[in-house]
Amino acid sequence: MEKSLYFEFDNIKIYNHNIIESTFEDKSVDLIVTSPPYNVDIQYSSNDDKLVYEDYLKFTEQWLQKSFDMLKDDGRMCLNIPLDKNKGGQQSVGADITTICKKIGFQYHSTVIWNEGNISRRTAWGSWLSASAPYVIAPVELILILYKEKWKKTSGSLVSDVTKEEFMNWTNGLWTFNGESKKRIGHPAPFPIELPRRCIKLFSFVGDTVFDPFMGSGTTLLTALQNNRKAIGTDIDKDYCELAKKRILQESDKVLFKNA
């Protein structure tokens, strides 16, 4: 099935399509920054976020294979996923997805622990003040850092724009910043610009192509535009494509005004 181009502006392209059914050119992107559905029953408009866990893992393997094929040999992926899951049964999500990545052919580099200050909305502790059945919930998420064939990046402009202070802070694998407001963005599960900003500046060169197969509100693409990268995003939901389009156009107006 052919991919459907929804919007194009400058070096930004948005496709209204399912990544699993899309046909993109192999070895065409430098960096993937994405946060896939967590399968925790978030009410997306066009996606079932409450699959049987085995089906969720099959879906994960399908989209990861597509993404792997799109990466250049020295391409990287920053994959934002849960550490674990307790809604509907305890599951080692981070470990299971890491295993799938390695099965497909991704090479493991490292893991960033994202300490999101407002992530924990604890309503139960299992057996209160008892050792019989307590629940342990870590208020963090993971950002897996993976690569395709070789870690050293030798393609592209070779121009980095990360500052000394940013480099020193971000190479420490514990990142602490708040999440994003669903109400402010208009999407049920947005991530903050700070997440793709760090990934893009730390793991890609100026002018590289960044891809987000679960674009949602377009935060990865918006950040790529802000930092002089090309970007491709896909989303199965047309309303989210429109939301991303509006955010890109608003940001382009700011960039034009700043450069005027």
Image (cartoon, rainbow, N blue to C red):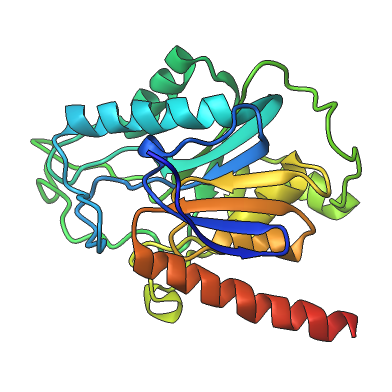
Can the viewer see residue 164? Answer: yes
Task: Please report the residue visible at 59 percent of the width from the left and 50 percent of the height from the top.
Answer: 232
Against 60, residue 102 (above or below) is above
Q: How many marks?
A: 0
Extreme front residue here?
A: 2
Res. 177 visible in picture:
no
Q: Position of residue 62 (x, y in %)?
A: 36, 28
Q: Position of residue 32 (x, y in %)?
A: 59, 40
Figure quadrant of residue 259: bottom right
* Picture quarter with the N terminus: top left
Residue at x-position 81% and y-position 45%: 168
**Is residue 224 rendered to the left or right of residue 141?**
right
Q: Is residue 193 above or below residue 205?
A: below
Q: Is residue 177 above or below residue 51?
A: below
Of residues 192 and 6, the one drawn nearer to the viewer in this rendering: 6
Left or right of 178 on screen, residue 120 = left
- Where is residue 254? Give x, y as percent: 74, 82
- Depth check: 133 or 146 in front? 146
